[in-house]
Image (cartoon, rainbow, N blue to C red):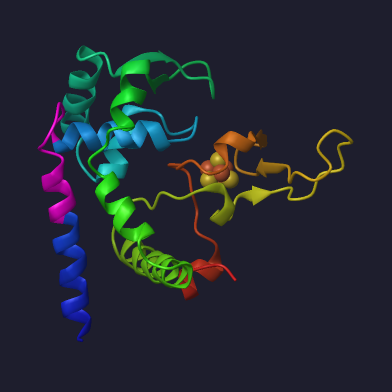
Amino acid sequence: MSARETAELLLLLGRLVQAEGYHGELSPAQWMALRFFARANPFSRTPSAFAEFQATTRGTASQAIKALETGGYLVRQRSEADGRSVSLRLTDKGHEAVARDPFDVLVRAVDSLDAEEQTAMHHALHHVLTTVAASGPHRHFGVCQDCAYRGGETCCSSTSATLPALECLLFGVAIEPEDAGLLCVHFQPTSEQREDGHRE
Ligand code: SF4
């Protein structure tokens, strides 16, 4: 199979999953926004971060956000990260909608692969994503575990001796365990990722 055929499969998959979004209460753009705010870390729950994530304009991103606020799926509040900027979070209705996300059809399809295939697929797609992101002007979102700004892996607290304590070296703050796996607009790939596509 040629690289082009494989790349076309990725494109077809993306289109098919996006088409699934037309079924139900939200448009595909609104589903993308709701998913983003469900997965974004405290530094990234802003309209501008969502616009970056979607590689779209602030105006287009704002339309989807406005519709979700009007529908009662999202609510606006002062950012916990800096106390000044706007932060958007899911309401109970938003969380209930995410639990019925049509994207789950893709999650189940991936889950039908065995563990070895899932690991190989994860590394391969991570490499492709990193390579494509590095070749364009759009920001690459990622999680703390893979970020060059991640610090402080060990912890000596008597209450959490077995838990790694992560720190964000960019902002000089501790990363709450529940935030470590969330997407960040300030993510910076490590040099190993830029060369190899994934960390060893
Ligand atoms: S370590 Fe990286 S991904 Fe995590 S909060 Fe800091 S900048 Fe964002």
Q: Is 50 above or below relative to 120?
A: above
Q: Is 143 above or below relative to 21?
A: below
Quadrant of the rendering where the N terminus is positioned: bottom left
Residue name at image x 42 percent, y 65 percent: 122
Q: Is residue 91 visible?
A: no
Residue name at image x 10 percent, y 38 percent: 22
Q: Is residue 90 visible?
A: yes
Left or right? Give the position of 180 relative to 51: right
Left or right? Give the position of 149 relative to 46: right
Quadrant of the rendering where the C terminus is positioned: bottom right
User: In terms of image quadrants, where is residue 166?
Assistant: top right
Residue 108 shown in magenta = no
Q: Nearer the viewer, residue 113 or 123?
A: 113
Left or right? Give the position of 7 relative to 38: left
Q: Which residues are magenta?
A: 15-27
Number of numbered tags placed on the structure image: 0
Q: Is 75 above or below relative to 135?
A: above
User: In terms of image quadrants, where is residue 67?
Assistant: top left
Left or right? Give the position of 194 relative to 70: right
Measured as percent of width and height from the top left, residue 60 is found at: 16, 32
Quarter holding ligand 1? top right
